[in-house]
Amino acid sequence: MSTTTDPSASDSVKGIFETMDYGPAPESDQQAQAWLERHGRTFGHVIGGRFVEPAAGERFATVHPGDGRELARVAQGDEADVDAAVRAAQEALPAWRALPPHQRARHLYALARHVQKHARLLAVLEALDNGKTIRETRDIDVPLVARHFTHHAGWAQLLESEFAGYRGVGVCGQVIPWNFPLLMLAWKVAPALAAGNTVVLKPAEFTPLSALAFAELALEAGLPPGVLNVVTGDGRTGAALVAHPGLAKVAFTGSTEVGRQIRQATAGRGVKLSLELGGKSPFIVFDDADLDSAVEGVVDAIWFNQGEVCCAGSRLLVQESVAAAMEDKLRARMETLREGPSLDKAMDIGAIIAPVQLDKITRLVEQCRAEGGRCYQPSWAARPGDGEAGLYFPPTLLADVAPASTAAQEEIFGPVIVSMTFRTPEEAVALANDTRYGLAASVWTENVNLALDVAPKLEAGVVWVNCTNVFDAASGFGGYRESGFGREGGREGMFEYLVPEWEVELEPYGEDALVDPAGGDALGLGGGGAERGESASGIDRTAKLYIGGKQARPDGHYAYPVIGADGAHLGEAPLGNRKDVRDAVEAARKGGAWSKATAHTRAQVLYYLAENLDARAREFGERLRSLTGASSEDAGREVTTAVRRLFSYAAWADKYDGAVHATPYRNVTLAMNEPWGVLALACPDEAPLLALVSLTAPALAMGNRVVALPSPRWPLAATDLYQVLDTSDLPPGALNIVTGVRDELAEVLARHADVAAMWYVGGAEGSAMVERESADNLKSTWVNHGKRRDWFDARQGEGRDYLRHATRVKNIWVPYGE
Ligand code: NAI
Ligand code: MG
């Protein structure tokens, strides 16, 4: 352009070259605004295939956080709306479930295509409603949404072969948050529909629009009416939905606090539950990491989506020797980040969702500063009047933060990272795990040995090696500890929407099949139990507890009589109390050696156990006969089945493999089956030996340390096992047994913070209690809701369902290639 004679133009070009400033690069919102206009900027719920007026006529505004302008008014759903939606989903269920898998697959493919076709509308709508940048909605959210439906179309297609023996759970109630509105919809709706379920979805009150647009697109794409219903509203609507008795499954993503409430609200209802909750994920940088890559990693970890990401790498842990260099590079990089209008294609960071969230971020940062944390924000952050035009918070680094401080422990859910240093890998792991959460972790090192040594030690459902915030439909995603339970994505995620057919077929226990769970009367305790004593024969026949590899007297020194089927007094069993349960958990906690033992070792110990039990088969048969009144033949069959079951799990110990997921990146995604750690289980009365073995063996095979409550009525079948255990090389703490009033002891276990998972087979009330009381540390539970299993039937009593419940999947992402 040397011929130009216009001095101002050449100035401007020259000026641009000199400053290299970005100009505005706005994405047009015309299409999205036209869509809103077409609906008169007023929406109802989508129920039974059409937009429906809210029963009470109440609406509220959803705004664009970038400028506070109202985008539309949406319906505030109440119980009547929720009920109508659940009924529509119930009505649509039989036909949808009966569709041949291939037909359902076609529907899911159609949804994926429609998302692709309307990608621009959805991306802009999402950016407008949430305030996040168009760059992210366009390049990440919407493509991942389409990918999710395509992937799950595949699962629908393969359902009968890949999930043989399972069926869809039924009507699903799904409540999602505002940070990835459409992506969270896809994560929940795609597997639900693929499994043959129908859905009532409640989007977050701040971001209802993309769900409404999606529901409309789905109808255009030919999804049958009622298969996907959307009810909008706030937390009250969400609470009404999860309380609805018509649901078979509840899936929730959001805060840990609400997750707890939902755990309690669904307890005892026979509802399957998955919770994806908060996080405070570590981002660990070792001294041999490529620091420039690690800095870009931090950008993606905490400044992606304004840091409003459940798995955001919000705790930067840097090895001391490179901490200064890392900080310098990071601060330089922060200067170049750009924050501003969502629809500007050159923005890195958009607006915070709402004033309440901005206040929370501001408060936590101020508190950290007041406590002596060093606070860095880029020089451009000091713009007066921020927060008035839009809800912006600058990228922030809080350094020298104490590990126990609020800023290091609370989920800030904003563009704020706290940094700490460590010296050794052990210290890094300890710091990383010093949180009540366990959603994700990111590890940066050029040393593959170090990365793969650290990854299994991290208490997190996802570990990214030299990468961060990578997601794909083929990989499971979900938390450990208070980050919730259940997985979304991949084969792991499909199980959340399926139930084994054998479980569906179970019938409730008969009236008097179970000992009164509430008290000791049915155990013949006559109140508080009897002092441990000698039986009429004068021989001390009081069994003991089994804790930490030793027989232990119960703390309270009480015992209760065990009465055989013919009324004979067969001996005394210890009446364990809270203290005994706590001791057992402590022994299990310390029994980490069992979890570290190789699968081969665990297999050998289980074989050995089986052989030792087999060697005493006659004695055990006799005992069972006198306890339960079973015929010799049936008692013998119980013992041989128990022996066989032990052999089965010995076989399984080194064969229940993980997977390498085919995620579409240059990496391997290793899905590892990890033990829970301490797993507690409560056994029913029937088949006292076989039930105990059926529950304990898979848990042990997968490397869990177990606290078992055996049959309260016939505990001697368990206490007789001690000698077998003693001779079978099971390390101390791997299996602990506490006898007594089962539901009283189960309650202590359900509440115990060091118990990571709990299984309960017994009455409906006890099941409800375990689910309710587990809410505190959000332990994973597997309860039978008062339904009787046939322990002799291998389909009901052993196999992959047990192994799956005995493990949790950790996905480790390892990039390869150039
Ligand atoms: P929230 O957990 O209250 O909201 C998530 C969803 O649950 C929304 O759809 C909401 O309407 C619904 N909800 C609220 N109360 C409910 C109840 N009692 N029963 C059923 N549904 C209910 O989260 P909120 O208030 O938007 O954000 C608070 C904090 O939660 C954030 O600062 C952040 O720390 C965390 N959060 C975590 C998310 C994650 O992805 N893990 C997502 C959103 C928030
Ligand atoms: Mg909004």
Image: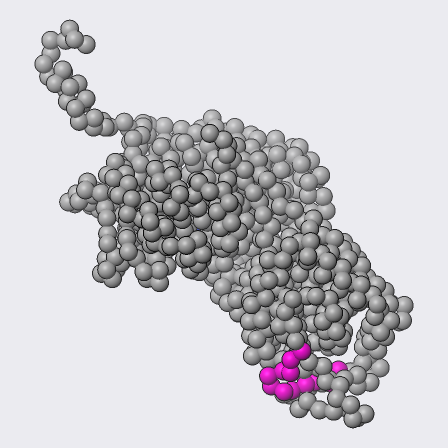
Nearer-the-camera pick, 164 or 786: 164
Q: Position of residue 234 (x, y in %)?
A: 40, 52
Query: Residue at point 69% right, 68% down?
Result: 683
Residue segment shown in magenta: 551-562
Nearer-the-camera pick, 174 or 228: 174
Which image quadrant is residue 679 in?
bottom right
Q: On screen, 687 above or below 812? A: below
Query: Residue at point 24% right, 52% down?
Result: 375
Q: Quadrant of the N terminus?
A: top left
652 relative position to 351: left or right: right
Magenta stretch: residue 556 in it? yes
Q: Is residue 645 visible?
A: yes
Which image quadrant is residue 757 in?
bottom right
650 relative position to 312: left or right: right
Q: Is residue 757 visible?
A: no
Q: Position of residue 214 (x, y in %)?
A: 47, 36
Query: Residue at point 45% right, 56% down?
Result: 426
Magenta stretch: residue 518 in it? no
Q: What is the residue that sits farthest to the left in this orientation?
A: 7
Q: Position of residue 98 (x, y in %)?
A: 69, 40
Query: Residue at point 68% right, 40% down?
Result: 162
Q: How many marks?
A: 0
212 relative position to 250: left or right: left
Q: On screen, 664 above or below 646? A: above
601 relative position to 83: left or right: right
